[in-house]
Image (tube, coloured by chain):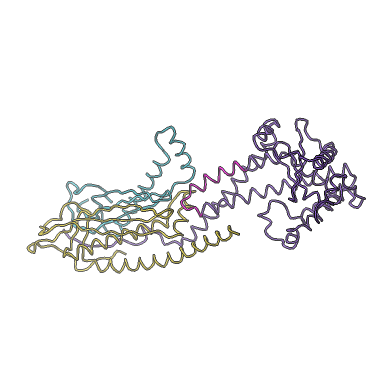
Chain colours: A purple, B yellow, C cyan
C-alpha cells in the first residue's frame, strides 16, 4: 500500500468570482423587493381606508387626545366660529358625506400651519392666520384640509404606516447586520412619502374646485402660495430643485404650476378682487408682532 | 443630517471591509499554498486504523486550531443573502481558509514532535459571534504515529499536486 | 466514485492513500421559509422547507468532496463524516470529509 500526499484542485469549495457582483445583484434585488412590497401595501391601504365607516374612525380618534379644541377666551372662540362659517360654506360645494361630523378647531399658538386628521378634525394655528391677507387665501387652506377629510387621507396614511412598519420590522430584524436593515427602511420610507405627495396634489385639485365654486375665481390659491414662498424655508425651497424625493409636500413651485394649469384647463380667473378677512381673524394680525 | 452621517459611516466601513478583507484573504491563501507544499511530507488521513505494515513506536494526539473572523463586507452580504436564500459565497472562502489553516497547524504540531503520519483526523467547527459579526473556529485533531524504525513504510519522495 | 463511512470495503484492497478530501457549502435560508418556520413554531411538526434545504446542501457538499477526490485521481472515499455548523446571520455550513483512496478491482 502506498501512502501519498496529494493536494486537491483549488476552487471546488470556494469560488473566486468577484464578490462585488454578488453584492450588486443582492442590493438591486432587495431594494426592488422592498419598493414593490411598500407600493403594493400602499395601494391596498389606499383602497381599504375610505371604506371603513366614519363611526369607527371617530371611535379611534376618540381614544386620542382631541385635536380640534375650543379656545378658552372670547376672541379665540370668535375666530373659531368664523373658521367654522368658512368651512361650512366651502363644504356645501364639496359634497361631503352625511355621516362625516366635521369639527373645526383653533389653537392660539405661533406655529404657521394647519392640518386635517382622524375623526374629521381640522385645526388652524394663529401663526398661519396672521400671515394670510384675504379670505380667499384662507379659504384655499380650508378647502385643502377639507379635501383631505373628504378623501380619508388620514386613515389611509395611518393604515399604510402601520402595515409598512410591520413589514419593515420583519425584514430588517431578519437580517444579520442592522446596517442592511437601516438602508432598507429608508427605501420603504421614500415610497411612503411619495404617496403622501400624490394625496397633497389630489387635495389641491379638489380645493381649487371648491374655491372656484364659492368665490368665482382662484386668486386665493395664488396668494397662498406666494405667502408660502416668503416664509422661512420658502426661500431655500424655491432656489433648490433637488431632494424632492424626501419631502412630504410637493415643492411650492410645483403647486403654483399646478394651479396655473388648473386655471387654464377650467377657464378660471385669477385676478378678481379678494374678499377681506372676517373681523376676528383680521384682529389677530394687528395683535401679533410682524 | 445624522442619517447622512450614519449612511456615510456605513459605506466607509463597507468599502474598508471589502478592500482590506480581500487583501487579507489573498495573502492568507498565498501563505496557505506555500505551506501546503512545505508540509507535503507529513501525511494525514481520516482512516481509523493504521495502514498496513506501520507499527507505531509512539502514538499521541495532535491538533491545530484557528479562529478567523468575517469582515464587515462579508457580514453585510450574508445578511442580504438571508432574504433570498442560496449559496453564501463570501462565507465559503472563510470556511475553506479556516479549515486548511487548521490542517496546516495540525501537521506542524505533528512534525514538531517528530511524527510524519497522522491518522483519524476529525474536524470540529464552531461559530463565535461577537454581536453582529461571525467568527469561525476550526479545530482539527488526529492521532500522530511515529513508526518503529524496523518498519518499512513507503513514503513518497515528492508530493503530487493535482492538476 | 465509491463513498462510504466504512473503514474498509469488504472484498477490496486499498492500494494507496492519497489524503483527506473535504466538501463544504454554506447556505442561507430566505425570508419566506423563515416566516413560515416562525408560524410552525406555534403548532410544531416537521419544517419541510428547512429539511429540503439541508438535504440539498448536504448533497452539494458530498458532490464537492467527490470532485476533490476525482481531481486527486482517487476512486473511493472512506471514513466519511459530516459536520454541521450554523453561522450567525442564519447561514449553515455543511462539511463532509473523508479519506481519498485507490481501491483495487472493479
The percent coordinates of residue A190 (x first, y second) are 63, 51
Magenta span covers which residues?
A161-179
Nearest to the observer: residue B33 or residue A45: A45
* Left or right of A257 in this view: C29: left
Q: Quadrant of residue B96?
A: bottom left
Nearest to the observer: residue A155 or residue B37: A155
Q: Quadrant of residue A88?
A: top right
Nearest to the observer: residue A200 or residue B130: B130
Residue that appears at 77% across and 42% down: A106
How many numbered marks are there?
Answer: 0
The percent coordinates of residue A40 (x first, y second) are 62, 43
Residue that appears at 74% across and 63% down: A239
The percent coordinates of residue A42 (x first, y second) are 64, 43
Q: Residue furthest left?
A: B150
The percent coordinates of residue B114 (x first, y second) are 16, 65
Quadrant (top left, top right, bottom left, bottom right) of the C terminus of chain A? bottom right
Q: Is residue A162 magenta?
A: yes
- Magenta: main secondary structure equals helix
Q: Residue furthest front?
A: A73
* Left or right of A247 in this view: C80: left
* Left or right of A56 in this view: B31: left
B157, above or below A280, in the image: below
* Left or right of A57 in this view: B25: left
Nearest to the observer: residue C93 or residue B151: C93
Q: Quadrant of residue B8?
A: bottom right
Q: Is residue B75 magenta?
A: no
Quadrant (top left, top right, bottom left, bottom right) of the N terminus of chain A? bottom left
Residue that appears at 76% across and 38% down: A70
Amino acid at each position: 500500500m502506498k501512502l501519498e500526499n496529494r493536494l486537491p484542485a483549488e476552487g471546488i469549495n470556494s469560488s473566486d468570482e468577484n464578490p462585488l457582483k454578488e453584492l450588486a445583484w443582492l442590493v438591486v434585488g432587495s431594494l426592488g423587493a422592498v419598493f414593490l412590497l411598500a407600493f403594493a401595501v400602499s395601494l391596498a391601504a389606499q383602497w381599504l381606508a375610505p371604506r371603513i365607516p366614519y363611526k369607527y374612525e371617530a371611535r379611534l380618534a376618540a381614544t386620542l387626545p382631541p385635536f380640534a379644541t375650543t379656545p378658552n377666551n372670547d376672541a379665540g372662540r370668535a375666530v373659531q366660529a368664523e373658521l367654522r362659517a368658512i368651512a361650512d360654506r366651502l363644504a356645501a360645494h364639496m359634497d361631503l358625506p352625511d355621516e362625516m361630523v366635521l369639527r373645526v378647531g383653533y389653537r392660539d399658538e405661533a406655529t404657521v400651519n394647519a392640518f386635517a386628521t382622524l375623526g374629521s378634525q381640522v385645526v388652524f394655528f394663529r401663526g398661519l392666520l396672521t400671515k394670510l391677507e384675504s379670505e380667499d387665501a384662507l379659504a384655499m387652506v380650508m378647502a385643502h384640509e377639507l379635501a383631505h377629510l373628504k378623501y380619508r387621507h388620514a386613515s389611509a396614511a395611518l393604515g399604510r404606516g402601520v402595515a409598512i412598519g410591520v413589514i419593515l420590522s420583519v425584514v430588517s430584524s431578519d437580517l444579520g447586520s442592522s446596517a442592511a436593515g437601516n438602508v432598507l427602511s429608508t427605501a420603504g420610507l421614500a415610497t411612503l412619502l411619495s404617496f403622501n405627495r400624490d394625496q397633497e396634489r389630489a387635495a389641491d385639485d379638489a380645493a381649487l374646485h371648491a374655491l372656484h365654486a364659492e368665490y368665482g375665481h382662484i386668486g386665493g390659491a395664488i396668494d397662498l402660495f406666494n405667502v408660502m414662498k416668503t416664509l422661512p424655508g420658502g426661500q431655500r425651497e424655491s432656489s433648490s430643485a433637488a431632494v424632492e424625493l424626501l419631502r412630504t409636500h410637493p415643492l411650492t413651485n410645483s403647486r403654483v404650476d399646478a394651479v396655473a394649469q388648473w386655471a387654464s384647463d377650467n377657464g378660471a380667473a385669477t385676478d378678481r378682487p379678494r374678499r377681506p378677512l372676517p373681523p376676528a381673524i383680521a384682529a389677530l394680525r394687528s395683535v401679533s408682532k410682524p | 443630517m445624522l442619517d447622512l452621517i450614519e449612511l456615510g459611516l456605513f459605506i466607509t466601513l463597507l468599502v474598508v471591509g471589502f478592500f482590506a478583507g480581500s487583501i487579507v484573504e489573498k495573502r492568507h491563501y498565498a501563505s496557505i499554498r506555500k505551506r501546503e507544499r512545505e508540509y507535503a511530507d507529513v501525511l494525514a488521513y481520516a482512516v481509523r486504523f493504521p495502514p498496513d505494515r506501520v507499527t507505531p513506536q509512539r502514538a499521541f494526539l495532535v491538533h491545530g486550531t484557528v479562529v478567523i473572523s468575517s469582515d464587515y463586507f462579508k457580514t453585510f452580504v450574508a445578511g442580504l443573502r438571508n432574504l433570498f436564500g442560496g449559496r453564501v459565497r463570501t462565507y465559503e472562502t472563510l470556511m475553506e481558509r479556516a479549515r486548511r489553516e487548521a490542517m496546516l497547524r495540525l501537521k506542524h504540531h505533528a512534525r514538531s514532535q517528530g511524527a510524519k503520519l497522522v491518522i483519524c483526523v476529525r474536524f470540529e467547527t464552531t461559530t463565535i459571534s461577537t454581536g453582529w459579526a461571525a467568527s469561525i473556529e476550526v479545530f482539527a485533531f488526529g492521532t500522530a504515529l511515529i513508526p518503529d524504525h524496523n518498519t518499512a513504510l513507503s513514503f513518497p519522495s515528492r508530493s503530487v499536486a493535482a492538476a | 466514485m465509491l463513498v462510504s463511512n466504512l473503514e474498509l470495503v469488504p472484498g477490496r484492497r486499498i492500494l494507496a492513500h492519497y489524503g483527506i478530501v473535504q466538501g463544504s457549502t454554506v447556505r442561507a435560508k430566505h425570508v419566506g421559509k423563515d416566516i413560515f418556520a416562525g408560524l410552525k413554531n406555534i403548532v410544531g411538526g416537521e419544517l419541510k422547507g428547512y429539511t429540503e434545504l439541508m438535504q440539498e446542501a448536504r448533497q452539494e457538499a458530498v458532490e464537492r468532496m467527490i470532485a476533490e477526490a476525482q481531481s486527486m485521481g482517487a476512486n473511493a472515499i472512506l471514513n466519511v463524516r459530516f459536520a454541521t455548523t450554523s453561522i450567525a446571520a442564519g447561514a449553515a455550513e455543511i462539511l463532509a470529509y473523508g479519506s481519498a483512496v485507490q481501491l483495487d478491482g472493479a
